[in-house]
Amino acid sequence: MATNHRIKSPVLKVDSVAISYETRYGDVEAVRDVSFNVHRAQTLGVVGESGCGKSTVAFGIVDFLGPNGKIVGGSIKFQGRELVGRSQKELRKLRGDQISMVYQDPMQALNPSVAIGDQLAEVLTIHRGISQQEAWRKSIDMLERVYMPDAANVMDRYPHQISGGQQQRVVIAMALLNNPALLIMDEPTTALDVTVEAVVLDLIEDLKRDFDTAIVYITHDLGVVARVCDHVGVMYAGEIVERGAVEMIYGNPLHPYTQGLMRCVPKLGATKEGSILYPIRGRVPAPKDRPKGACIFAPRCDYATERCHNERPLLREIESGHSARCFYAEEIDASAWKPPEGLVPDLLAPEAEEVDREPIIRVKDLKTYYEHESKSVLSLVGMGEKLYVKAVDEVSLEVPPGKTLGIVGESGCGKSTLAKTIVGLESPIDGEAEFLGFNLTAPVSKRDVQLIQELQMVFQNPDSTMNPSYSVGKQISRPLQRFRAASPDKVHAEVIRLLNAVRLDGSYYNRLPRQLSGGEKQRVGIARAFASRPDLVLCDEPVSALDVSVQAAVLNLLLEIQREHGTTMMFIAHDLSVVRFFSDYVAVMYLGHIVEFGPAEAIYAPPYHPYTEALLSAVPIPDPTAEQKHIRLEGTVPSAMNPPSGCTFHTRCPRRSMLPDGGKICETQVPPWRYNTEEHRIFCHIPLDDLRKMDPVVTTREG
Amino acid sequence: MAVSEQTIPKKIARPSRWKRLREGASILFASKIGLIGLVIVLFWILVAIFAPLLTPYGPTEQDYTAQNTPPSAAHPLGTDSLGRDIWSRLIYGARVVLVILPVSENFWLPGGTALWGVFLGLLVGSTLGLMGGYLGGWVDEVVMRVLDAMMAFPVILLYMIIIAAVGASATNVVLAIAIVGIPGIARLVRSLALDIRTRDYIRAAETRGESPWYIMFVEILPNARGPIIIDAMLRVGYAIFAMGTLGFLGLGLPPPSPDWGSMVAKGRQFILSGSPWAALWPSVAIASLVVGLNMFADGLREESLRYQ
Amino acid sequence: MLVRDYMTRHPVMVEPETSIVEAQGIMAEAKIRHLPVVEEGKRLVGLVTRERMRIPPTELASLNVWEITRFLSTMTIKDVMAKRDEVITIGPDTPLEQAARIMVENKVGSLPVLEEGVVVGIITDTDMMAHLTEMMATRISGVRVTIRMPNVRGELAKMVGALGEQGWGIVACGGVPAPKQPDLWEAVVKIRNAPKEDVVAVLSRVEGQEIVDVRET
């Protein structure tokens, strides 16, 4: 249908907006000179790392800046009406039910003590004044439109009774009930599992078509942007540095920051070369350190000149509809970029002689169950049925020394429990685990100090990985002292050496954790883990809480250290693209089982286990032109207390139809291991030949 | 972030204690309420320390010619029924409460009964709380039930039972204060430990095979010190109140000890007959100290919250 | 082809208390000529158009300079809008041509689209014209032929059949009674991917029908 005669004016017109916060030290500018337009039925992605101000802009639009934030310049026009400078009352009237917002945490919008149906209906009865019944009916309609299974029943439930993905769908339904002209979404899928995220993203795309809503989509995930956005604004340190249509931004990024981002985003490349992550050196400047008369990215830019340090570039149009804030945007050729010396370890260097060595760690049929407190009266007396959460259920794996095993799975698959069992924080109830001749089935308290020393861990959350009361140096020296890895007079020097190894200089010795950034804390965590030169290091999602550019740096660091010390690594992640570039082996886990195991290249190419295939199709790829299969999993992950019989994946497997009888056998029998090659095995009933005939999930253009 | 290759000097001094103290002090001074509270508390401490210099009379000096006199030039706050100068008794009383603990005839410890009582309570209570919070399981069950039992007694009753059992002396009062404080402190520390033990750095310590005692006292406790300190401040206030009440009930420090509670007790009879001074001033003193401590604790909490 | 497919959703709207000056600015910037006036919950209470914003000269004549300025600056939309009962509206599931008919018969340039009293969109004469261009495949290149035939059942089918036999793609097809000759019917078809001569040849062979115009567009 023809739309080019339609209203050309944007639903939202943001023009040179500046937002500041009042702090103890004076006014701090969080956002400066931000301009963009959003039209009907268009999705604008605002993308950037933490601290870039993207959420601040969103809050500025809906006037949620808090008591000490204010818009100090520019204009925000919504449907032609100026929002800046109006009173609260006026704003409320103007916005009314025309702007809705969806947050990262659905529980911020949902009242835990009110039934979902009531919360939805309330949106309508308050704004539109229609009857409760009418509102109820419309709410059910809307829930069905957001593909909520069993919508009528969900209306009577409470938020905690539905899963995270479903909660987010309810929030989206609530946001759309009043048919807003503008929908602002602030990282709505960041907290969701990859497969759930894929379904919610599909939903957002559908809704765009049906409702013609203008959407501002805020995220740090370049893959998600490629999937749902039409236009993109890239933000850095409070400014928009590049803006344009999504194909242009990804196909021809003009600003060095965007180019840098593209290089450090994990990709599902077909080869190891295609998957290398290049970090951006330097650190985002704090709001009070942002120069007004210079290019804000200059300190970190590989192309910066004298001019960049003394003059502030304006956002100018380089090609039609594509603008960048750089003096040299036309001249910089991203494809000619070479990584500076030492930025990444030499990953492509041939490794030391491949000797067929015995695996350094061997796990066989490991089972770790948690006992679940039953609520029945009988259990009080000890006679009730014991319920177990089967977190790890018959897992077997082996890793040769010096190699990296990536363990991937979504929440509830048992990967964390597996790691904890190996390290000794949990005790298995059955199975064998052996490492360097030591038995790993004993808990930490019963293990030999020698064993403990060789088996260390890097944790996920940088904010809690360090003890806030002690200095960095003290915390790194503790393992050195405890394991006597260095004599008392050499400890200090060794700590400095470790700090340098993680690219922090000696002055960090006396700093307290609260003085460090997330990436720096994670590095200290790595230094601490490697202090005693363990033979095996487990990394439990060490980078998922970090910004993309910092992730790349930390991942490369891990690789480098591993190479230097010859450490074996087990790396846990929830995302297949993150482990791609440096895992030698990959294990995919689902509900306590490993469903596929093999060398990395084998996992990303067919034959796939159906779950691996679904995971690969769900990962948002930062390339809008890539072709990716569209396999989605129905339903939710079953409870680990009562896992399905036979193959635990049978309740959601999209490939069941490949078997006779619609896969009856999957319900009754535990699948066999199919060996594609000696090292690559798949846990499935489907015969190998059929699996081999699958098409690859992703076809990207390399480079 | 720089990757510097410069040589590092042998010993890098830690930001000195002074710097950290100054930082702590600046938190203090940022809150007006905290400042006022601090001033009040300091007033009493200094007055107690310099007691002999601030009054010509001893606390037990009796003057039969001047019984129950109102404030005058000679006796700024008046005298009690035995002719003792109230002001002197107040400031010497502050000593016992805040500054000096007379353990026996010849032996005394710095710190005062209230402070020692709270301190002991902290020691035992924290340990119990850490054990219950971190070790969990049956240890936690046992600790909790013991605490529940202790908390079932009304505080004053508990005080009375203890003193009645072991007799009234400075050290016994300290003991009583400690015992009464244990359940509250233990519960606080336990809930802090429950929260802190979920942190990754505790996992890291466990992965290193550190012993539970190490983890409890070296890893967990320092991170709980904020709320514990603030709670301790408040407890000093409660302790003083309690001593006052004990004294009032005749179970406090033995006479002629000038503790405020006893002073109120003795002076009570004369309120209606026109000489309220003996009861009034110690009451004001108790109130002011308690309020001062509360304000100080408030100020600390406000600022440390903002600081977070 | 329903109204909901062609209307503009989330139209720019104002409240009754909006000043005329502001409304003017909005209309100018958004380049629109029709502004629905709504209250809480997007309930339609009136409609403002450019014509409505013209103050009748008779009213003006009675004011002096000071009064005019005050008049202009304090006037709100409420004072000039067409009230709800004067505004013609339609529902989103109305066929487009029905909407067009209403607009023609009532001489209005736009129709607010309401669902249960709530504004969900607006459809204007420009939308209608866009519809027309779509219907006639104006943007697709091909051979456009006007054929005159007796206004009798079966004639159109004959012509379409002849084209169909050739396997050609018909991208547009419309017709009206011939102007001033009610026994005749004029059909316009647009054919794609077919050479003009072939089309002419085929259609000439259809009995009783005459090619009146043929062009490549």
Image (cartoon, coloured by chain):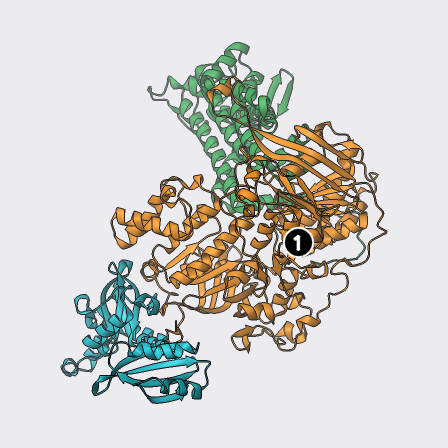
Q: Position of residue A671 (x, y in %)?
A: 63, 39
Q: Amino acid at mark 1?
A: Tyr
Q: Position of residue A497 (x, y in %)?
A: 79, 49
Q: Is residue A622 visible in this depiction of the protein? A: yes
Q: Is residue A166 left or right of residue A617?
A: left
Q: Is residue A181 above or below residue B20?
A: below
Q: In the depicted view, which residue is nearer to us: A563 or C208?
A: C208
Q: Is residue A16 above or below residue A279?
A: below
Q: Is residue A24 above or below residue A230?
A: above
Q: Position of residue A34 (x, y in %)?
A: 50, 68
**The chain shown in green is which?**
B
Quadrant the N terminus of chain A occupies? bottom left
Give the color of chain A as drawn.
Answer: orange
Q: In the depicted view, which residue is nearer to us: A433 or A56?
A: A433
- Tell me which corner region of the image, top left, top right, bottom left or bottom right, holds residue A663: top right
Q: Position of residue C210 (x, y in %)?
A: 31, 88
Q: Is residue B150 above or below residue A12?
A: above
- Tell me which corner region of the image, top left, top right, bottom left or bottom right, holds residue C28: bottom left
Q: Is residue A311 left or right of residue B241?
A: right
- Tell me which corner region of the image, top left, top right, bottom left or bottom right, holds residue B142: top right
Q: Is residue C18 visible in this depiction of the protein? A: no
Residue position for label 1: A604
Q: Residue at x 53, y 35 (%)?
A: B230
**The chain shown in cyan is which?**
C
Please report, as a chain letter, where disc 1 is located: A
Q: Residues within 10 Å of mark 1 (few under 14, many from 20)?
A: many
Q: Find numbered disc 1 in the image and state the secondary structure of the residue it sits on.
A: helix
